[in-house]
Image (cartoon, rainbow, N blue to C red):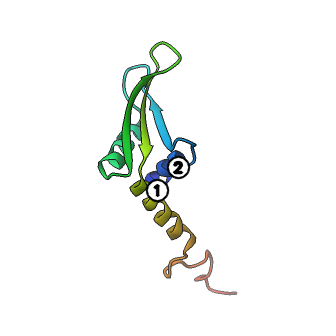
Amino acid sequence: MIDHERRLLSKAAQTAEGRISVKRDPDRSWPGDHSRLCALENDGHLRFVGEQAGPHIGGTFAIWQITERGRAALQVKEAQMRTPTRDAVPFGAGAPQR
């Protein structure tokens, strides 16, 4: 399963400005990541910077910047990814041996 929170925070943290943006679709709707970014903003992990017109007519971008709280949450998530869980069983480990 994809951890969208980690994916989006990581994407923002990798940029020099700590920003992430999504482009509004031609039909004026937002892609699915827009609502995920709004949720991260509500949690204090991102700060909404604003909307900006893109270089092409009709191209509008919503922009967020990662916060210190977001960076801390990302570090915790990445540490959890590196730490194996006690419940993890290697594939085939429980299979009967022949």
Is the C terminus in the top left, top right, bottom left or bottom right quadrant?
A: bottom right
* Of the pair 8 and 88, the residue shown nearer to us: 8
Residue that protrudes farthest toward the left in the picture: 42
Marks 2 and 1, how far apart in space? 7 Å
Q: Is residue 44 above or below residue 16?
A: below
Residue 42, position as x, y percentages in the image: 29, 48
Residue 68, position as x, y percentages in the image: 42, 55
Mark 2 crowdedness (10 Å alpha carbons): few <14, some 14-19, many ≥20: some
Residue that protrudes farthest toward the right in the picture: 98
Dot 2 corresponds to which residue?
A: 13
Dot 1 corresponds to which residue?
A: 71
| Residue depicted at x 48% and y 57% | 1
| Residue depicted at x 52% and y 49% | 13
Badge 2 marks a residue whose secondary structure is helix
Residue 47, position as x, y percentages in the image: 37, 43
Q: Earlier in the sequence, mark 2 or mark 1?
A: 2
**Dots 2, 1 in contact, CB < 8 A:** yes
Under mark 2, the amino acid is Ala
Location of residue 33 by image quarter = top left
| 25 lies left or right of 84 | left
Location of residue 34 by image quarter = top left
Mark 1 crowdedness (10 Å alpha carbons): few <14, some 14-19, many ≥20: some
| 4 lies left or right of 48 | right
